[in-house]
Image (cartoon, rainbow, N blue to C red):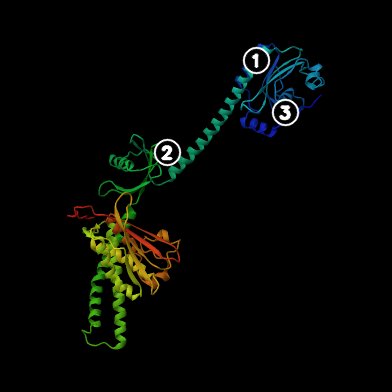
Amino acid sequence: MRTPARPGGELHRLNALYEIEILDTSRDPGFDRLTELASDLFDVPIALVSLVDEHRQWFKSHYGLESCETPRDISFCAHAVADDRTLVVEDALQDERFHDNPLVVSSPHIRFYAGQLLRPDGRHALGTLCLLDPRPRTFSVADHRRLSLLASQAEELLREHQLRVRLLEQKRTLASTTQRLGALLRAIPDPLYLVGVAGDVSRLDGDDPVSDAFADALRKQRSDIDGVSDIRTFTWQEGDDGPVFEVRLLPTQDGEHLAIARDVTERHQIERMKAEFVSTVSHELRTPLTAIRGALGMLVQGMAGPLPYDARSLVAVADKNGGRLARLIDDILDMEKLEAGQLVMHPRIAPLGELVAQALLDNAPYAESFSVGLDLVRPLPAEDRVGVDPDRFAQAMANLLSNAIKHSPAGGEVRVELAPRALAGREGFEVAVVDQGAGIPLAFQPRVFERFAQADGSDRRRTGGTGLGLAITRRLVALMQGEVSFTSVPGKGTRFCLWLPRAQPPFTSIKEETHE
């Protein structure tokens, strides 16, 4: 007896067999009907769907045979797999490969064998659809064709089985995912909503009805979303006394939108109380501080008589720190007004070059105190005008200039550059404030425009300031329809750019914007 060889690519063939997940499964009526049909069609007592694994041949269907497997070493089908072609043995006793095979010399006494390879993936021979007969017989060309057709049906059944297995796995995965998502939805305290393609709104984590007002708000915000990567966050409150929600609306790939509504009523109440407290305290501090600074000014001017030498320095220190405290109070009040949308703007048309020149003139004494020069580069023509609140523009420029001055070395220079520049399709002008300082640390750059943000405590003590200037500047410029940006290389200085849109002629009047 000749033992069947192992075919080339055996590992890949076995992997293909195991991926079907059919070995040692229960009987399948589809396979059994096929082997019964093969037995009747070819008039043989035994027909098998045989799959050859590493050590055996296992029968998915075994019509006319009680056994469901045999060792691979004595398997006729293993020879067909090894040769990678249809195997027909018309008389096993006359074939040197099988004449002393246990399946020939003993039950089931095979004399005739015909096995058509099964390739359900189109590549690997996993086994055969085979016919067995204890009588020798011939096998015609027509028989070959009929057996090939039946084998193709067996391959289809194998593919269907694999699809059923995968579908079952997907169902189990889906059920598990659904269970986890359900648990997650129950664990999330924030209500979840789905906005359908047609605009219908439903709640995902409960059966509570969705109010018409909230549904309308979701649909309106959805219409403003641009692309699947856009996430829209907005605040919503139903009525004057209802809870306040912070809603995040994000699109899905299929055109629907998910909405997460977080109750921020308590946070809003705390923020309102904080704002009221800060505003009250700031106003209460401003009145006595004004009186203190007035008295100190009178002392400095000698209105109460000459001061002793030691007293003059102490009064000067008190007056200087009183000024710092006054600026801090003003910054806090401005920030609270900006946060509440209550800062009143008084815009008008003005030449940008003149506004910038005045800002440099106003801040020249401050620059001299640090031994830093101010240089205006490329002034603009008088007809280059912008629509701004001149006082608030001067405040924004003062914040940028004072920052640049404080961070420049003694003897250094702060350059202010003016140039036309289009931004997002709009004509406008850029005002760049460039210093020669140490630059902004990379780790701190994302926080530059945050409230009370400073690179470190030592920097604040050295230069002074509240950490509110840049935050206020960005909001003021935004109210004037402009933008503020910066670039900074540690060790090579910083460049802050203030951009404003060009005021279009005729220069007559501009509508006053009031944010209440």
**Mark in front: 1 vs 3:** 1
Q: Amino acid at mark 2?
A: Gln
Mark 3 or mark 2, earlier in chain: 3
Q: Are marks 1 and 2 in contact (CB under 8 Å)?
A: no
Q: Which mark is residue 145?
A: 1
Residue 175 pos. (x, y %): 50, 35
Looking at marks 1 and 2 on the same chain, the residue that comes earlier in the sequence is marked by: 1
In what element is the residue under mark 2? loop
Q: Amino acid at mark 3?
A: Arg
Say which residue label 3 marks: 56
Q: On the rendered structure, is 155 left or right of 358? A: right
Residue 311 screen position, x and y as percent:
30, 85
Which residue matches tag 2?
253
Looking at the picture, how far across and down is residue 194, in whole percent?
37, 39
Q: Secondary structure at mark 1?
A: helix
Examine the rendered structure and indicate whether residue 61 appears above or below residue 214: above
